[in-house]
Image (cartoon, rainbow, N blue to C red):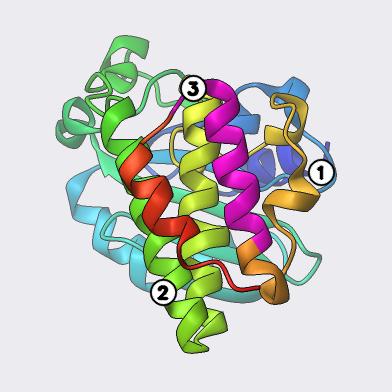
Amino acid sequence: MKQIQRLNDIIAFNQHNPDILAFIGLGSMDETYRLDAYSDVDFFIIVNPSVKPILYNDVSWLNVSSIACWFQETMDGLKVVYEDGILLEFAIFTLDQLPHIEESGGRIYFLKEGISVEDVMVRKPNTITFNFEKTLNMLYAHCYIGMMRERRGEHVAAHTMIQVYAAHELCELCNPTVDDRFVVERRIEQRLELDFSRLYPGIQHNQACVQFILETCKKHGWIHASMIRLIESLYTD
């Protein structure tokens, strides 16, 4: 796939830099059976501390193809988009940072001589746990707030509360062991038997979305009678 070739090109361009210690593929760059034409290139690059700020401020080390756009997204992460459409999403870490990173797995694409697999694969266990009751309560609260905004005529704000936040929480409740703990909606069409056309009906149908969410919760026995009464009291004719 073109994504693997792009990462290999970057590695070849930088492999003789003594401060670059490893490249570790993540996501579909680890589980390569998931790669398709629309996958990004997700990876960690492990470096010596002295070179880390340089790599953030000067992306010439990625000039294996023309770059259309790049920016620093987080303290450790960058996004880079090439003119040919390939997207890099990566983070730069030093060896002493790795024990504090909540990430597991990964495929080693490059390892500097003298650096062991154990050195670069040490990660902090995931401490994020799924709280069913909290998620269910948030779902009802977001439906209620969303319907109040809908009645006020704030259809865009209502859409965010209902078809973004509450819909997200319904997907979590239906699929607590998520495929991607950062974005529960990833590949959800293959895992959940939900009518997504009713869960995401569009900005003119916020009430219909709430009705579908409540219907789904009732079907599963996830009932909060007081909140259901309050939400349903806001339905328009």
Q: Nearer the viewer, mark 1 or mark 2?
A: 2
Residue 229 visible from this viewpoint: yes
Residue 22 location (% of width, % of height):
42, 31
Q: Quadrant of the C terminus?
A: bottom right
Residue 79 location (% of width, % of height):
51, 62
Pointer 2 local density, CA inside 10 Å: few below 14, some 14–19, many at least 20: some
The residues tagged by marks 3 and 2 sit, at their Cα atoms, a distance apart of 25 Å
> Label 2 belongs to which residue?
148
Residue 11 visible from this viewpoint: no
* Residue stretch in magenta: 208-222
Mark sitting earlier along the chain (1/2): 1
> Label 3 belongs to which residue?
221
Determine whether label 3 and label 2 are within 8 Å by CB. no
- Looking at the rendered structure, the secondary structure element under dot 2 is helix
Residue 67 location (% of width, % of height):
66, 72
Mark sitting earlier along the chain (3/2): 2
User: In the image shown, does 101 or 154 lie closer to the viewer?
Assistant: 154
> In this image, 153 relative to 66: left or right?
left
In this view, 85 is above or below 228: below
- Circle 3: residue type: Gly
Residue 171 location (% of width, % of height):
55, 37
Q: Is residue 126 magenta?
A: no
Q: Quadrant of residue 186?
A: top right
Pointer 3 local density, CA inside 10 Å: few below 14, some 14–19, many at least 20: few
Residue 2 — which label?
1
Q: Quadrant of residue 93?
A: top left
- Looking at the rendered structure, the secondary structure element under dot 3 is loop
Q: Nearer the viewer, mark 3 or mark 1?
A: 3
- Circle 1: residue type: Lys
- Circle 2: residue type: Met
Give me the residue at 48% from left, 52% from top: 166
Magenta stretch, overall SS: helix
